[in-house]
Image (cartoon, rainbow, N blue to C red):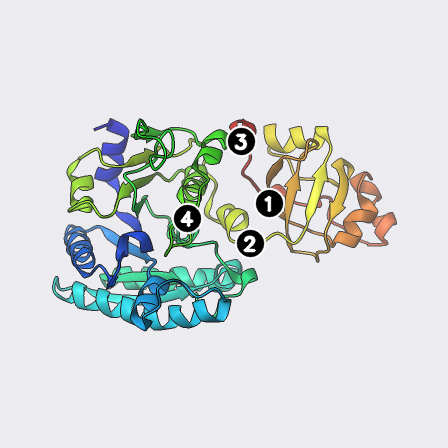
Amino acid sequence: MDRVRQSTLENSRRIVIKVGSGVLSLDHGLNLKLIESLSHAIGNLTTQGTQVILISSGALACGVKKIGFQQKPDDVKGRQAASAVGQAGLILAYENAFETVGCKVAQLLLTRDDLANRRRYLNARNTINTLLDWRIVPIINENDTIVTEEMKLGGNDNLGAMITLLMDADLMINLTDTDGLYDKDPREHADARLIPMVTKITRKMEKAAAGAPGTLGTGGMLTKLQAAKRLARAGIPMIIAPGRKSDILLRIFRGEPDGTYFVPGKKRLNSRKCWIAYSLKPQGEIHLDKGATRAILSRGKSILPIGITSVNGTFSKGASVEIKSDTNQTLGKGLVNYSSEDVTCIMGHRSDTICNVLQLSRPYAEVIHRDNLAITYEQDDAS
């Protein structure tokens, strides 16, 4: 096994495990044997002193089977109602399985709003930390029953990455219904090869991974790559592994080279900048000229009004906005010191003229201070 992967596994004291609906579901409902196996493996890890947070899909799939439908309802209210039925059965199955290994579980259902609001974000972290201190396994799912399109987290691959960042975990393991990442779609190409390690996720790789999600799930390989990319930017590794493989977690921690290991990046966004980059939904866009683009990418500078060329959207002071380069590349996100109306008025001006333009006595010199600016762009993003 690669030394980097081995070192990660040996030194991981807090891990997030995400298991997808494609792994958990069978034609007749939940795969209870797999849930039992998963619970036993997590129980062993907790006994050894490893803190485990479980992100579990499966509520909708469980509800569909429990009600007797042949497929997911087409309408939103139908899917939400089926998820409500399934979530009860899902957590009960976990509770029964973990009880056999002497572990208690707790259920948390989250939406984007819970993680976008800084106070609730920190409250969620405090709650999960307390559960881990009590040696209780938190089982987290997106609150599909009430979530609206604007509140969606984008599936449990994204939720798993966000919880990994929230809890500053050492590793995320994404258990899925494939063996890992392949160089081409194994469903269409018999000669597809498993990639054991990925050091950099490129657009070319993401494009190749884009495909139709499963019939009972909402995610595909693309969302898993996007999750791995977010974690890599925060300095956290991820493993995609075959969730239905016998004793997969035991195999992974025993050193078997199952799945694909994603090497973390060397540059690490701090916790607050991860929150800005990945928990907040942008309310607009700010476009920069070539000089400002170079200043924030190469020198870590704040965004000044003189470097702004255009503003899109309507936003208020303190809102999250997306930062675009002179070539329309997405550079990251930031929290603005001015509303969209005020930014439009001062863009292209020197900072020492803001007081006259906006008639303010003590204006901010920066439209976005570097402490409130999360850069997610990498050179390979363009390839």
Q: Is residue 91 above or below residue 353?
A: below
Q: Is residue 299 above or below residue 119?
A: above
Local packing at callout 1 (Cα closer than 10 Å; few below 14, some 14-19, many 20+) is many
Q: Quadrant of residue 212?
A: top left
Q: Residue 294, which numbered label?
A: none
SS category of the residue bearing label 1: strand
**Coordinates of residue 214 in the picture (x, y in percent):** 38, 50
Labels 2, 3: front one: 3
Whole-angstrom CA distance, mark 1 to mark 2, is 9 Å
Whole-angstrom CA distance, mark 3 to mark 4, is 24 Å
SS category of the residue bearing label 3: helix
Disc 2 target residue: 280
SS category of the residue bearing label 4: loop
Give amino acid for label 1.
Answer: Lys
Residue at the spot x=56%, y=61% of the render?
A: 150
Residue 180 seen in the current view: yes
Labels 1, 3: front one: 3
Give amino acid for label 2.
Answer: Leu
Local packing at callout 3 (Cα closer than 10 Å; few below 14, some 14-19, many 20+) is some
Q: Are marks 3 and 4 in contact (CB under 8 Å)?
A: no
Whole-angstrom CA distance, mark 1 to mark 3, is 16 Å
SS category of the residue bearing label 2: loop
Disc 1 target residue: 333
* Sequence-earlier tag: 1 or 2: 2
**Coordinates of residue 359 in the picture (x, y in percent):** 86, 54
Give amino acid for label 3.
Answer: Asp
Q: Are marks 1 and 2 in contact (CB under 8 Å)?
A: yes
Disc 4 target residue: 213
Q: Quadrant of the C terminus?
A: top right
Labels 1, 4: front one: 4
Disc 3 target residue: 381
